[in-house]
Image (spheres, helix red, strand yellow):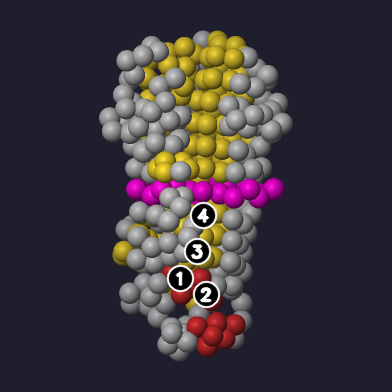
Amino acid sequence: MLVRSYIVPFSLIALLAACAMGTGGAGVLEVGPSQRLKLPSQAAAVARPGDIVRIAPGEYTDCAVWRTSMLTIEATGEGAVLKDKTCAGKGIFVIDGNDITVRNLTFMRAAVPDANGAGIRAEGRNLTVEHSRFIDNENGLLANAVPGSTIRIVDSEFRGNGKCEGQCAHGIYVSAIDRLEIEHSRFFDQHVGHHIKSRARRTTLIGNEIADGPNGNSSYLVDIPNGGDLLMQGNRLQKGKLAENNTTAVSIGAEGVKNPTKELFVRGNDFTSDLTVPTVFVRNVTTTPAMLAGNHLHGTVTPLVGAGSVSP
């Protein structure tokens, strides 16, 4: 794979872009203190479809708008952190391109004037996030409504996100997309809002840990406000003593059922409530039966309110 080199100062963005265009073919853009591209935003300015952006470990007070499609943006080792700066009043990474993969990066302390900033703001179609961390942001990941889009999150961590000032921010919040898939990821210490809020037509949550812990004060652990197909399997969930919403852990259809909802499967999960009052594990406001099977519930918990069935 071709590694492009740059021989002009970074302040001359137009010349830098022209240099990139002249190399022919997609390639690797190296970013880091010892590279000519010092910041991710400089790579975003010249990236072309198919490029791999490789970011060296270090702390970057930087943000970037990624308009090019078919990119892989990844750290070359542990400890590549983007923090304390946002672009376009939206987030640390604003991803407008399609078919993007983000891997092994940490996003910290995204904040914007409307209190809805995100570590990643996803505005294009199809995003994969792997092995990444979202720490102390308003939203960890916030996604626009994009028909036909799939957002997939694997082996990632969301810790200490959330805010409610005028509007609420969440660990993950996706608007009307086709699919949200989250696997083997960890959600802890959410500050108000929900750990996961999905308006996707289908939401799949497999093998995750979603827990308030002793200090988190989230609302729902999982909110599926407009219905849509749901598979929750093999997750560990915990509602803490400080939870702002002490009535429900998983809510389906509470804001009106706008998505076609053919199946709701909640199976093989482990849920603990540390609340001193009774709470509901799954509250189903849709008319589609929620099928609960093989879940292990600890504390004063009602398994299901609404249409559906509960089996061992």
Q: Position of residue 20 (x, y in %)?
A: 55, 82
Q: How would you rate the neighbour count of disc 4 (Cα within 10 Å): few for under 14, some for 14-19, many for 20 or more? A: many
Q: Nearer the viewer, mark 1 or mark 3?
A: 3
Name the residue tied to disc 1. 41
Sequence-first disc among 4 and 3: 3
Q: Position of residue 13 (x, y in %)?
A: 50, 83
Q: Who's the residue at 43% across and 56% down the image?
A: 113
Figure quadrant of residue 125: bottom right
| In the image, farthest residue toward the front | 166
Name the residue tied to disc 4. 121
Figure quadrant of residue 238: top left
Q: Who's the residue at 53% across and 14% down the image?
A: 304
Question: Which type of secondary structure does the marked residue at label 2 adopt?
Answer: helix
Q: Nearer the viewer, mark 2 or mark 4?
A: 4
Q: Nearest the camera: 276 or 25? A: 276
Q: Quadrant of the N terminus?
A: bottom right
225 sits left or right of 87 in the view: right
Going by the numbered disc 2, the residue's amino acid type is Ala
| In the image, farthest residue toward the left | 214
Q: CA distance from mark 2 to mark 3?
A: 15 Å
Q: Which residues are magenta?
A: 129-152
Instruction: Say the numbered circle drawn on residue 45.
Output: 2
Instruction: Say the numbered circle drawn on residue 169.
Output: none
Sequence-first disc among 1 and 4: 1
- Looking at the image, is 148 positioned above or below residue 312? below
Figure quadrant of residue 265: top right
Name the residue tied to disc 3. 88
Q: CA distance from mark 4 to mark 3?
A: 10 Å
Are circles 1 and 3 on residues that touch, CB within 8 Å?
Answer: no
